[in-house]
Image (spheres, helix red, strand yellow):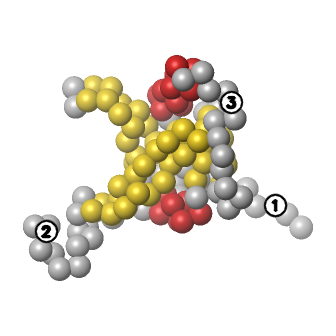
Amino acid sequence: MTTEVQTDLILLTPSAAATVRDLLAERSLDDSYGLRVYVAGRSCSGLQYGMALDNNPAETDLVIESEGVKLVVDNQSLEYMRGATVDFIDDERGKGFTVDNPNALPSCSCESGSCGC
């Protein structure tokens, strides 16, 4: 019997991982904490994501490590985010986390199309 190794899970860029480590240090949180990433909803511009520092994953959550940082993902969000990369940008557009998700199709999620899509 062989064990399948999943390599297409969510990844953090070095910049995002460094930012999470900085946030943990600023808040004096230990390494039991990780970054929870989840799909928070859907809008005309696609999937909306949420993130929080979390040290209490549910039994059904997947906890993975990327760039030395724990990532906590619920099963439902993982289905939408498999293969995504979480980055942190700080440029002329502003600063914050971004998600590059190959599963997010650029289409309107409004059933009626009345939102102007």
Picture quarter with the C terminus: bottom left
Picture quarter with the N terminus: bottom right
Is 108 on the left-hand or right-hand side of 75? left
Alpha carbon separation for disc pair 1 and 3: 28 Å
- Mark 1 or 3, nearer chain start: 1
Which is more foreground, mark 1 or mark 3? Answer: 3
Which is more foreground, mark 2 or mark 1? Answer: 2
Mark 2 surroundings: few (<14), some (14-19) or many (≥20) residues within 10 A: few
Q: Secondary structure at mark 1?
A: loop
Question: What residue is shown with label 3?
Answer: 31
Alpha carbon separation for disc pair 2 and 1: 46 Å
Can see residue 11? no
Label placed on residue 117 = none
Q: Quadrant of residue 55?
A: top right
Question: What residue is shown with label 2?
Answer: 115
Nearer to me, 34 or 5: 34
* Residue at 49% from the left image edge and 57% from the top image edge: 81
- Mark 3 or 2, nearer chain start: 3
Alpha carbon separation for disc pair 3 and 2: 43 Å
Nearer to me, 64 or 42: 42
Above or below, comparing residue 25 to residue 100 in the picture: above
Nearer to me, 57 or 13: 57
Question: What residue is shown with label 1?
Answer: 3
Identify which amino acid the numbered label 1 is placed on.
Thr
Looking at the picture, how far across and down is residue 39, in whole percent?
Answer: 44, 57
Can see residue 10? yes
Q: Are marks 3 and 2 in contact (CB under 8 Å)?
A: no
Q: Secondary structure at mark 2?
A: loop
Q: Quadrant of residue 69?
A: top right
